[in-house]
Amino acid sequence: MEEQTLTQPVKSESAETEASAHMEQPDARATSDPLAVMGDFVDPNEVTDAARAIHAAGYTDFDIYTPYPVHGLEKAMGMKKTILPFFSLGGALFGLGNAIFLQWWTGTLHYPLNIGGKPFFSPWFGMPVMFELTVLLCALTTAVVMFGLLCKLPQWHNPFQKDAGFRRAVDDTFVVVIEAKDQRFTVDSATNLLEKLGASNVRLVNV
Amino acid sequence: MSVKFSENQFDLKDSSFVKKLELTGIGLFVVGGIASLVAALVLEEHAWEAFLESYLYAYIYVLGITATCMFFSALQFLTNAGWSALVRRVAELFTPFIFVIAIGMLPIIFDVLTSHHLYHHWLDPQAHEVGNEHYDPVIVGKSWYLNPTFFCVRLIAYVLVWLAMYFVIVKNSFKQDTSADDQSPTRKNKVLSAIFVMLYALSTTFAAFDLIMSLDPHWFSTMFGVYFFAGNFVTTLSLIAIFTVLLKEGGYLPQITSEHYHDLGKFMFAFTVFWTYIGFSQFMLIWYANLPEETLFYQERLHHGWQYFFYALIVFHFIVPFSALLSQKAKRNPRVLIGVGLLIMVMHAIDLAWYIMPSFSPHGFRYRLLDLGLLLLFAGLFLFWAARQYKSHKAVAVNDPFMRESLELVS
């Protein structure tokens, strides 16, 4: 999928003009390999119910794209809990350790300076730096791991973007996507399921 | 959109919960009363003075919680909070104790006007006499603020503010229970809570200055009011969390879910950190500047045995609750909430003892039976008073406009 994506440049303008005719006329660029089945919802509660049903039907490789965060959706989808907090904790502890070591080593061993008769090292004056470095490295680790490692960003192109209806996920539509890489995926079963759940504009998107 | 509950739901009048609460209250009151009597009459040489010191300590413990429960309620109105509609009444049913708090101010006012024990430092006439060996220019300089008349006027003003807060915010909240369609009490509270949150901040800050900081009139810290608030707020949140868990586990509030636990847990977690942050900021600035008039406070509180309370606070008021509540799972676990909540409530008693009592006993650690006895007596009265409220009010603000949001809460 990745290689094919690279060989197909994004043609955003033409895709938009083709939007209305998408269902009737298959995209000329499209191959016959299915990528995903998509369906639209307009109500956040309905899409949450649909997510619960799709999860209950046994699908794992499906996702829901929403214009804004919908509370409870991740639970309805049966998503596993993220391992991100452990990276955050690791980053925080690393920052804390660094701050203690840096202040203790520079203050007492490497270059001891007598400042106003204060001790060379004390947890009391060291606390703000410990706090700051803990928070800083915790935040940086979280951001980098979340975007880079877990969300695999930046990603310049996603084949879903060929589907004009998919773009409305950033505007006013909740788009449910059942991907072809799912073990249970067949075009018919996915289409039937989405239609049964009340999705409108159920469509097959090819690679 | 209002939610219909059945007529008798949340009516705990005849429930075993209220009976148990009442019995616990009476039990603590009796045990505390006997302990205090024995301690005051047998163990203490100067019974009245000893009583006043312990009384101030125990009184401030319940005062802080009662006033902060009203603040909690006002805060929910002010922020249009939806999550707390099921929980808010738990806090509000503690607030009628404000009448006891109002009357409880009398012994302190009596002491200021006649027996001059608690605040003898700045009440001492010799300190104001030029040429006297006890002449104290610092106290003379502060006498425009620290004089018996103004002091008593201020104490009465704080009590009036808290009573007004009860009669406006809490009473309006109770009024909403009678009508689902007329939402004017909630709407009124939204505006009034903005005013009362500010009045609460001013009154508790200055109450902390007057009741606690002026015990040692040479010392001053602008952080002190916030520190007092931070301790009170985390203790109040713990109390609310404990009662919410007890009501849910007892089957009286089946609508409470782990989402509500999660929000309460987050609140407790955040404010243990806030308490630590404020406490540390106050300490570090004084430690670093090293000015004699400021360090005196910590000089007394970090020596002669008082330092063990200080270390206990760092470990059990911060490190243990912080670690225990860090994970999401723990915040959603009712046992963790109860355990950490009780720990915080005990540590708040230690915290108060640590910053109040050294003013009376700077050269030696002291935690007397009388301190504990009066604390238990007040705690018992507080619980008994709360149990009485469940007989005349429902345990939930049934007609709260945000009830649906709270019922469907996903945090």
Image: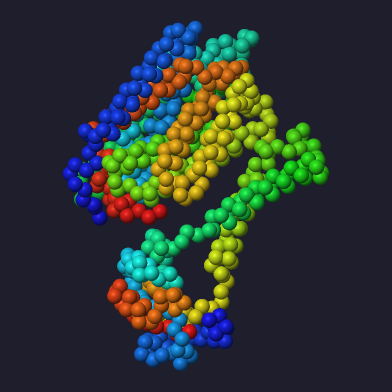
Asked whether, in this view, residue B314 is left or right of residue B37, the answer is: right
Q: Nearer the viewer, residue B46 or A162?
A: A162
- Quarter residue B395 falls in: top left
The colour scheme used to paint the residues is: rainbow
x 34%, y 33%: residue: B94
- Quarter residue B17 falls in: top left
Asked whether, in this view, residue B404 is left or right of residue B344, the answer is: left
Q: Position of residue B86 (x, y in %)?
A: 31, 46
x 68%, y 35%: residue: B288
x 46%, y 46%: residue: B330
Q: Position of residue B214 (x, y in %)?
A: 53, 23
Task: Using the rendered image of the protein, determine whether residue B151 is visible from the camera's viewpoint.
Answer: no
Task: Using the rendered image of the protein, determine whether residue A98 is visible from the camera's viewpoint.
Answer: yes
Q: Position of residue B317 (x, y in %)?
A: 52, 35
Tell which residue pokes out farthest to the left in this image. Answer: B7
Q: Position of residue A160 (x, y in %)?
A: 47, 79
Q: How many marks?
A: 0
Q: Nearer the viewer, residue B406 or B60?
A: B406
Above/below status of B304 relative to A98: above
